[in-house]
Image (cartoon, rainbow, N blue to C red):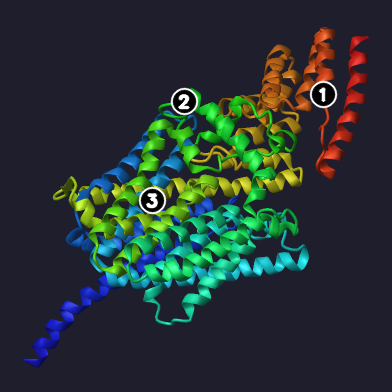
Amino acid sequence: MQQLKTAVRSTTETPAFSSLFAWKLSFWLVFGVSTLFFWPLCLDLYLAPRFFSLAFSLLVAGFLLRKSLYAQADWRVHGFDFWMLGWYVFNTASIFWAYSWSEAVFYSQKTGLLLLVYWLVRQGFEIQEGVVRQTLRQLVTVLASVASVIVLVQIGWAFSERGLDNDTLYEYVNGVFGNKSLTTDFLCLMLFLHFLLWRDLRLKFVGPTLACTLILLILVLQTRTVYLALAAGILFYGVARAFTDPAFRPVFLKRILPIGLLFGAILVLFLQWKGGGSMVERLNPANYLESASANERRFVWYKTNVLNADHFWWGVGDGSWKLWFPSKNIEGGYRLQEQNVVFTRAHNDYLEVRAELGILGAFWFCALFGLSFLSGIMALRMEQAQTQRNEILWLLSGLLAYCVIQYFDFPRERPELQALLGLMLGWLAWRTKGFWQKGPGMVVGTGRKIGGYAAAVVLVFCLTIGWYRIQGEMHNVSMLKAQVAKNYAKVAKEAALAANVFYEYDDVALPMPYHQGLALAHLDRIEEAEAAFEMAYWMNPWSFAVTNNYATVLAQVGKLDEAILLFEKTVATNPKSDEGKSNLAYLYMKKGDVEQAMAWYHKIDTIVKPQTEQDRLKNEQTKRDQVELLKILQDLQK
């Protein structure tokens, strides 16, 4: 009889253990491995590799959890589920009106990964709350600790060599997410998740130690956006908890509020201080409006709004902002015009969504967060247990911080930050299910397997996209090395190999045939170069680099009228393009139009207020080029 009981117990415990392990492994893959995964042979070590890694992790998780999800998941699809699904469908539909199919596919499928992370988290809490909570606690501690150690090493390296000014930090702190702004974004979200899971810590000293470390790193990294996000999130939590927790209210009013007012007064005095070095200046938010970064953002946002007026309802399609942006010309953007800096992001997710998906997409995107806050606030009114209320408050605080970050940065682009957004949205949807259950919904019955197969198809498609983009970036890296070595035959070969159906542009929106055309022109294979530039122009007709070089090749083969039109388009896009003006002066003189030639010659100008040594050197070179050009024009006139 005892043997029979033992046998029965073992057969019932094994599946349970297997299920627990599957949930733990799935969350470690989705949030652990995918967050830190990188591929050193890629042009961007993190973007495409983490897109691929997240898709792979979700596919493995779906396989491991298929039985558990089918049998135990909450298959009542409610209002927020439909809104998340609609967001993915809307993004995918934009492929059909986007200028670039390859970029639209890549950007739109990130929303598919966001949807699946959201669904996994929501069901994880529904089925195995204890295991999921414990696993997330471990994940947040490990990820925050690993990121902190890496950043501390990089900060130490920067300090030992050049100090801790902002430019130096941008150069050195790039070993986790590519740049210091994205790194600080991640640390900020880790901090809110750490506060959220604080009560689940077994070793109590870990809580304050890790929190202080993250806050210190955020301060040292000098990212104003995160300063604002952190302040907004903490302020929201304190005020909201004072309203919802009677026991906390006296503490807030008698201790926290007076300290907060004292710090506020100090802040007001601090805002009047304009000195103190790089870090002190960046700690002062009043200095931001005077910075080059603020001026640049305002310029990009202004030009984006001009673009939006022409694409009001549907936008230009996912991933296409970076191609359309120069179409309204870049006059007024100092670095864009004088230093050939290319913006591939609007540094404002709301505005970029508005540009790519129109006013309808902007409404849908903002409603994702609006509905989350609405459900959270309603759940606070329904929930009686203060522990659950605090959990909702921390989730809302983290989401508020994310909303602030995406006003100045681009977390929408990064898979690891999208995974964290999916985590917060899924967790909040589960915690507020009482609110959503009162609204309309639909119970999925026989369609469960269809949904599972559809998710698998999406993930396999994402794996394909990620793999092709990784391959393209690896060839791109080889091409850039060949450019440095002036091995133009290899440049042409690698540029051709890099281009594929899912990877058509480099990291600054230049088509791969553009690089091929440059290499072929250096090899004096002019006809082939012309064909390559023609393709590049078709792929990005608003890049003044593309139009300028295409026009140069056309001039070489004697197509002067076509070349003049393209050089004029180059100058229309970038009125500071002295190369375009010089070429126009030369071609008009070659055609015998002296008046037009000299008119373009006199439009060549130097930088009015050179800000750096590089600007001064450029002015000197421009003056020398003018002298040489004048001699050439005079010779042609004879």
Camera-nearest label, 3 or 2:
2
Q: Which residue is mark 2?
A: 311
Can residue 56 be seen by looking at this rendering? yes
Residue in the image at 22% along x and 77% along y: 14
Q: Quadrant of residue 322?
A: top right
Question: Which type of secondary structure does the marked residue at label 1 adopt?
Answer: loop
What amino acid is labelled 2 in the image?
A: His
In the shown orientation, is residue 559 left or right of residue 204? right
Q: CA distance from mark 2 to mark 1?
A: 34 Å
Can residue 420 be seen by looking at this rendering? no
In the shown orientation, is residue 347 left or right of residue 271? left
437 shown above or below 332: below
Looking at the image, which residue sits at the far left?
Answer: 1
338 shown above or below 247: above
Q: Which mark is residue 604?
A: 1
Mark 3 neighbour density, 10 Å: few (under 14) some (14–19) many (20 or more): many
In the shown orientation, is residue 116 left or right of residue 31? left
- Compare marks 2 and 1 and give the one earlier in the sequence: 2
